Image (cartoon, rainbow, N blue to C red):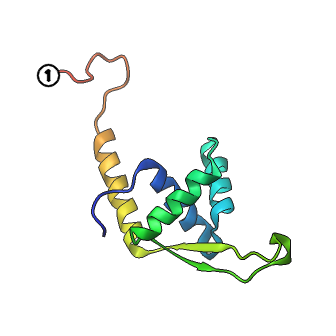
């Protein structure tokens, strides 16, 4: 696995690509994130992140055949690599450890004794 854990937004992009399978491309990734998180995401942020994740070795892309619907332009399709799944699992494990044993808000125990 490349060094470091994926950021929160990188995790969202990776999970969307993983969920979409071999048909994942920029616009579909954006839609998946927006529908599942209820948050608005810029298309530019998605594309920049897809390229960064490919450079990190967590995604691989290929150009699909051009389609008349897109004016003859081809979509760049992404797929998740095993290293990314490993990184996602490590990030989830770390977050689960942080959540573990937290008191309920207002219990007066948050940060006690530290």
Q: Quadrant of the N terminus?
A: bottom left
Between residue 90 and residue 23, name the one nearer to us.
Answer: 23
Instruction: Determine the residue positioned at 46% across, 55% down.
Output: 10
**Residue 88, percent across and down?**
40, 60
**Residue 16, percent across and down?**
57, 60
Instruction: Determine the residue positioned at 33% across, 56% down.
Output: 5
Q: Quadrant of residue 6?
A: bottom left
**Residue 101, percent across and down?**
28, 36
Quick check: 54 above or below 9?
Answer: below
Quick check: 3 above or below 81?
Answer: above
Instruction: Determine the residue positioned at 54% across, 74% down.
Output: 79
User: Residue furthest toward the right?
Assistant: 68
Q: Quadrant of residue 62?
A: bottom right
Between residue 27 and residue 14, name the one nearer to us.
Answer: 27
Mark 1 lies on a secondary structure that is loop
Q: Which residue is mark 1?
A: 113
């Amino acid at each position: 696995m490349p060094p470091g854990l994926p950021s929160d937004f990188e995790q969202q992009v990776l999970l969307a690509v993983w969920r979409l399978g071999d048909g994942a491309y920029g616009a579909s990734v954006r839609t998946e994130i927006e529908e599942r998180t209820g948050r608005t995401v810029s298309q530019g942020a998605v594309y920049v992140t897809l390229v960064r994740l490919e450079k990190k070795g967590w995604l691989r892309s290929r150009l699909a055949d051009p389609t008349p619907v897109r004016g003859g332009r081809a979509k760049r399709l992404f797929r998740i690599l095993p290293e990314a799944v490993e990184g996602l699992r490590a990030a989830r494990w770390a977050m689960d450890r942080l959540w573990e044993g937290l008191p309920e808000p207002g219990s007066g125990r948050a940060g006690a004794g530290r």
